[in-house]
Image (cartoon, helix red, strand yellow):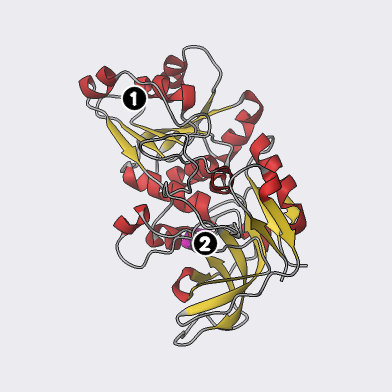
Amino acid sequence: MRAVLLTGFGGTEKLEYRDDVPEPAAGPGEVRVRVAATGINNTDIWTRQGAYGAADDPSAGTGWRRLPLTFPRIQGADVVGRIDQVGEGVDGPALGQRVVVDPMLYTGTERELVTTDYLGSERDGGFAEFVTVPAANAHPVDSALTDAELATFPTAYSTAARMLGRAEVRAGETVVVTGAAGGVGSALVQLAALRGARTVAVTSAAKRDRALRLGAHAAVDRDTADLAARVRDAAGGEPEVVADVVAGPLFGPLLGALAPLGRYVVAGGIAGPVVQADLRTIYLRQLRLVGSSFGTHQDFADVIGHVARGELAPLLAGTFPLHALREAQEAFTAKDFAGKLVVEVAA
């Protein structure tokens, strides 16, 4: 089959397009999906770069669990396609059914999110013609959206749903969202609105209007001076929640913008994972700092429900053919787009 193999940690030269990769077979309790489209995520980039570090060595080359990976590996978590093969003991979904795949491969409680396998990282993913997954992870979907549009949802939106849940966002509260024109950020804006919360988008000046069209109540340029004060002005007071996927130099100012007893939930650090903060701000204002990553099976099912009801907008920024995955990841890293980039796998 056609696939792109990640052969080791490094640059895009580590991505090797092949047309002679053996096809996987569905094992007991599994289904095989003929892949139509697969979304690209920050996790793909950080995994290729080995950028997650280790607890005792931030520069160590590791996967997202901060452990070594096995190569070669087929990346790609956000899979949309049709059931092509059914393994022993599987009652559904049926052959030929269109599905969206939940990429989190744990089988017990959500505590396992910290140690579970993730599709395209510890198990081969969707940058290939076929992928096998546990049958329970293949969610039938009834939607007029294209395969590429559906592939914008899985990781970004379930990650955002978990962030909002972990931060206990309630109706009437204000949530500050960083990276609001990106995959998780744009999902946060939409999902917060479904919870009845207001959002203040922190993004580049060029992407401000996009965030407002998504439903943000206000937008602040991330490069502005006195960011904390401008966020409070835009929020009409001190916001209750910051939902952050950018970190870097934004971390300290946004922490300082929070209301007393506020919650700061973080699920990424694309501007720099090692940050500076004044601990006095945290303990004197009795703030909560909450870590979050990926989403639970319930988060994923909730997202698919929103999609089926037409409550979420697919933000497809562009598509690439499978053989151009190197170029796709380079375009993703450049961040000169709003929404999500998707690889179309079907010939």
For label 2, count other residues whose C-alpha is less than 10 Å away and answer few (under 14), some (14-19) or many (20+).
Answer: few
Q: Amino acid at mark 1?
A: Leu
User: Would residue 161 be found to the left or right of residue 1 on screen?
Assistant: left
Q: Which residues are magenta?
A: 304-309
Residue at (43% x, 64% y) in the render: 105
Q: Position of residue 174 (x, y in %)?
A: 39, 33
Q: Quadrant of the N terminus?
A: bottom right
Asked whether residue 62 appears in the rendered view, the answer is: yes
Residue 306 located within the stretch drawn in magenta: yes
Count of numbered tags: 2
Residue carrying label 2: 309
**Image height of 339 relative to 84, above or below:** above
For label 1, count other residues whose C-alpha is less than 10 Å away and answer few (under 14), some (14-19) or many (20+).
Answer: many
Residue carrying label 1: 258
Q: Position of residue 6 (x, y in %)?
A: 63, 54
Q: Position of residue 273 (x, y in %)?
A: 45, 32
Whether residues under marks 2 and 1 lie with C-beta atoms below 8 angstroms apart, the answer is no
Q: Earlier in the sequence, mark 2 or mark 1?
A: 1
* Residue placed most toward the observer, 57 or 219: 57
Q: Position of residue 196 (x, y in %)?
A: 40, 43
Residue at (21% x, 19% y) in the render: 284
Q: Amino acid at mark 2?
A: Arg
